[in-house]
Image (spheres, helix red, strand yellow):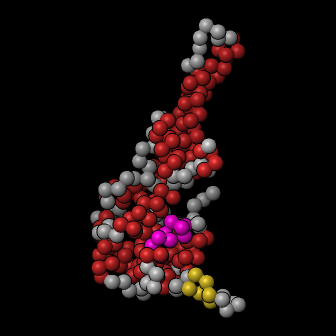
Amino acid sequence: MQQPNIPFIIIKNIKKLKETYSIEEDGSRSEGFLMGVLKEYNLHNTFMPIFDNHRGDEKTAIVKVAFTILSYTYNSSWLNIAVDRYINKLQILTSLVKDSEIDIAKDTFDSILRNEDTLLQECASMYISSQRNGDFQTLIALTEHKSFANKMAMTANSDTTDIMLKNRTEYLNRMPDIQRSIEKIEDNLRTKYMILDEALRKEGMSPITDNLDFTDYETRLRFIVENNLFDKKDLG
């Protein structure tokens, strides 16, 4: 399934960001525009700590969250790696504040640009990780399959039968196709996240496609755990 272009949604509806709530047809009050978008794409819990930290000043929370999405999404049209990263972030935040007509305190503005807001950085890190799509899971599954095929191909002893030798040959024949599939996915991921990766490098952060080599079992397991790629019941 194609990932939603949330930056595009925000940019096209940027003046709606200042709406901290809306009135339904029945007269009831519901959450504002941005929170509605976050809930639609199941990102509300990722950014909820920011909203909780700014109760009574929701517009500041809105700016922080919108800035994070516009600055750290791989398909954000406002990402520009041709300029200095600080300049690009300044451009994004300035345009966001001006176009949305939301004023924030100067010290808040500066802390966002300088990565001095610890809570915001933690939420940004979670959001960056959430962009890892099904291709990452496929890559891990293929690497697991390659490891299994390699193990079976190398299994032989004095009790090896003709059928076991035939199976061993089949496993060996699969290896080139598996490796080509792995390399294709790795190339596609690096191309897809190229702009975001470069932006992250400029901030001294780990690229989203960092450490794509899942040959080692512990590396695969660590990635699965850190990115919550399995159900908790599978831990048993």
* Residue drawn at x 38%, y 79% as measured from the top left: 95
Q: Is residue 169 left or right of residue 86?
A: right
Specify the segment rendered in magenta. 43-51
Where is residue 19 shown, x and y percent of the image?
52, 86
* Left or right: residue 204 compared with residue 142: left
Q: Nearer the viewer, residue 210 or 192?
A: 210
- The residue at the point 54 percent across, 70 percent down is 44
Q: Is residue 171 magenta?
A: no
**What is the chief secondary structure element of the magenta stretch?**
helix
Q: Work out whether 230 lies above or below 76.
A: above
| Residue farthest along the top direction in this orientation | 158
| Numbered disc total | 0
Q: Position of residue 188 (x, y in %)?
A: 50, 48
For this orientation, the residue located farthest to the bottom is 27
Residue 200 image position (x, y, % from top left): 36, 58
Q: Quadrant of residue 173?
A: top right
Point out residue 54 in the picture as x, y percentages from the top left corner. 43, 79
Of the pair 203 and 234, the residue shown nearer to us: 234
Q: Is residue 175 above or below residue 232?
A: above
Q: Is residue 128 visible?
A: yes
Closer to the camera in the image, 4 or 82: 4
Residue 211: which quarter of the image? top left
The residue at the point 36 percent across, 83 percent down is 104
